[in-house]
Image (tube, helix red, strand yellow):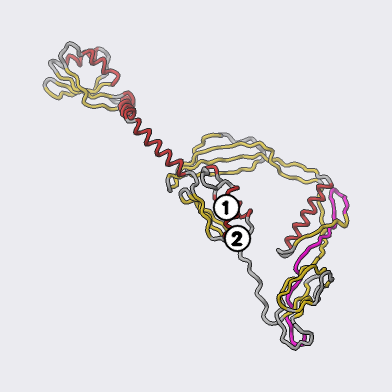
Amino acid sequence: MKNYTIAKWLGVLTIHITGDFPEFILNRMAQSGIQIWSIKRISRNGFEAKIFLKDFNSVRQLRKGTGIKIRIRNRFGFPFIWKRFIQMKGLMIGLFSGLLTIFLLSNIVWGVSISGVSPEIEYKIEKSLDKLGVEQGAWKGSLKPPQELQNEILHDIPELLWVGIKIKGTTYQVQGVEKTIVEEEEEKGPRHLVAKKKGEIIDYFISKGNPVINVHQIVEKGDLLVDGYLEEEHETPPVAATGTVTAKTWYLSQVETPLQVKQEVVTGNHYKKYSLGIGGWNVPVWGFEDPEYNNTHVENYVHEFYFLHWKLPVTWNETIFLEKEAKEIKRSIKDAVMVGLEDARNQLLSELESDAEIRNEKILRRSTNNGKVKMTIEFTVYEDIAKPQPITQGD
């Protein structure tokens, strides 16, 4: 039989034909159209031959009344493999179910560990992870990749300098590094505290030195706030004055906000593609055509799979094409004013110390021309205006 593939799928029997004149059966088989091949004599009254499984019953009918015996010596092909599988289906189903259970359990989050941070920051990280869905019982494939999770956590918790997420088996290991507030090194030697800008004193706390100011007092830049000498007569050595002096300060900001702007917006139309990644190859599963969008924003998500603690060389890849379009957005004067205020506020905060607080804002002048809203804004800020000034000989 030259066609091995056909033989494999139909099933082949190796039979032994023994008895008086076994050639008689061989001739009848040939006359009946039964395919027989690989015929060889095994004894004076016996032959070995191969036939298809489907012809075996016909061969048994032909040998009736002849006294010739036919025995099956070997079986080959898919029908026999399938029969053995059916006989062992209980074991196979159990094995498959066990492997499937292990696979499913290996791709569920069973633990989240956080290290390298204080208890307060650890609590904040836990809350952020809960919001992102990283919790016990979560399906790994539904979670964002570690890099995106890291970015989300850093955005949520400004006290973190760095955060890293590593998936080890069924556990998400989160390690963080907090920002270290480096305090300015104290200037050596005695010093006064003077005003670094004009302001109205609101409050002060002095740990060393002699305050020479009062609440609601207006001070100018360079005015003495805290004297390093504890006595007017200067009989005792001066100290390094320390403390904070909170004052009300004022800033003017000039902003221009256009009434009409071009912005790219997502229309809501989207198209998804799915593929199976196997050993570096991507096999498309769904979404075989590119979307007919003139402008798109593409988001890629790669979901990894694990078996126990081993990462499988298989990934489920999702690509989302979001349609974008440029739109001319017309703002009302009210909206333009709000945008201008927000821009001016953010710009001012970026220039102030981190402990400064904007308490009030007032539009002094506003005009509209050439498609723009122009404003002059006065901001009232509470901030520490004290800065050290060394005491030199002769002060």
In this orientation, does residue 3 appear? no
Q: Is residue 276 left or right of residue 255?
A: left
Q: Is residue 109 left or right of residue 380?
A: left
- Name which residue type carries label 1: Glu
- Name which residue type carries label 2: Leu
**Residue 68 spot, x, y in % from top left:** 16, 16
Which mark identifies residue 79? none
- Which of the two residues, 356 or 203, is positioned nearer the viewer here? 203
Q: Which residue is mark 1?
A: 126
Of callouts 1 and 2, the N-terminal one = 1
Badge 1 marks a residue whose secondary structure is helix
Which mark identifies residue 161? 2
Magenta segment, which residues? 366-395
Residue furthest bottom in the image? 235
Badge 2 marks a residue whose secondary structure is strand
Asked if the stretch drawn in magenta spans residue 379, the answer is yes
- Which of the two residues, 341 or 43, is positioned nearer the viewer here? 341
Q: Is residue 258 left or right of residue 75?
A: right
Asked if the stretch drawn in magenta spans residue 171, the answer is no
